[in-house]
Image (cartoon, rainbow, N blue to C red):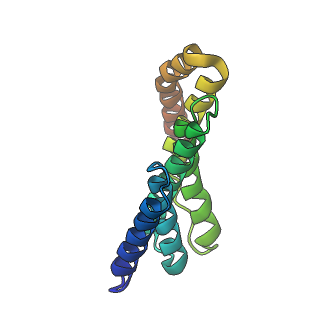
Amino acid sequence: MSGWLPGVILIVVGACLFLVQLLHLDADVIVLVIGLVFAAAFAMTRRYGLLIPAGILTGLGAGILLEDTGAAGEPVMLGLGLGFLAIYAVDALTSGADRPGRWWPLIPGAIITVIAGASGTFGDEGAHAIEQGWPILLIGVGAWLLLRRRTSS
């Protein structure tokens, strides 16, 4: 991290927290604000280490705010899942053709988003069925990867 960046991040977070107190905003906005500060830091530096908390905290904060407005389903989980997916999407868009995007955020992003969607759509029973089915899906994908590797060698 550049010598100036940690100081700038602390000043911006502190100023945002001060404004939250001054304007008597709900404390739930703090998670979103901190995520957006990390997003701005990533935009300035293009450092992947800043994109991870930016995606997670911004998605989580947006989900918290949606839940506060009375959104149906599981908005906090959905926001978190979409935050992970955003990490992948932003990295793919900004990394350029010379460096492939990192795909790891797709795993927690897809799992959390599907469970949140199922819980919101089908209720707790649907979410429970999907939670129970993930191990089977992982076994199937793992077996496919092993067989694909074996047949291509």
Residue 96 occupies which quadrant of the picture?
A: bottom right
Identify which residue is drawn at 52% across, 39% down.
76
Q: Is residue 75 above or below residue 120?
A: below
Q: Is residue 114 above or below residue 101?
A: above
Furthest toward the top, the residue is 125
Image location of residue 105, percent across then percent down:
51, 50
Image location of residue 113, percent across then percent down:
58, 37
Q: Is residue 48 visible?
A: yes
Asked whether, in this view, residue 12 is left or right of residue 68, the answer is: left
Identify which residue is drawn at 64% across, 34% down.
71
Image location of residue 47, percent across then percent down:
46, 73
Asked whether, in this view, residue 146 is left or right of residue 100, the answer is: left
Q: Which of 86/133 is in front?
A: 86
Q: Which of 25/103 is in front?
A: 25
Q: Is residue 153 visible?
A: no
Q: Is residue 151 above or below residue 35?
A: above
Identify which residue is drawn at 46% across, 66% down.
19
Residue 43 occupies which quadrant of the picture?
A: bottom right
Q: Which of 111/121 is in front?
A: 121
The quadrant of the image that shows the N terminus is bottom left
Q: Which of 90/57 is in front?
A: 57
Image location of residue 146, percent across then percent down:
49, 37
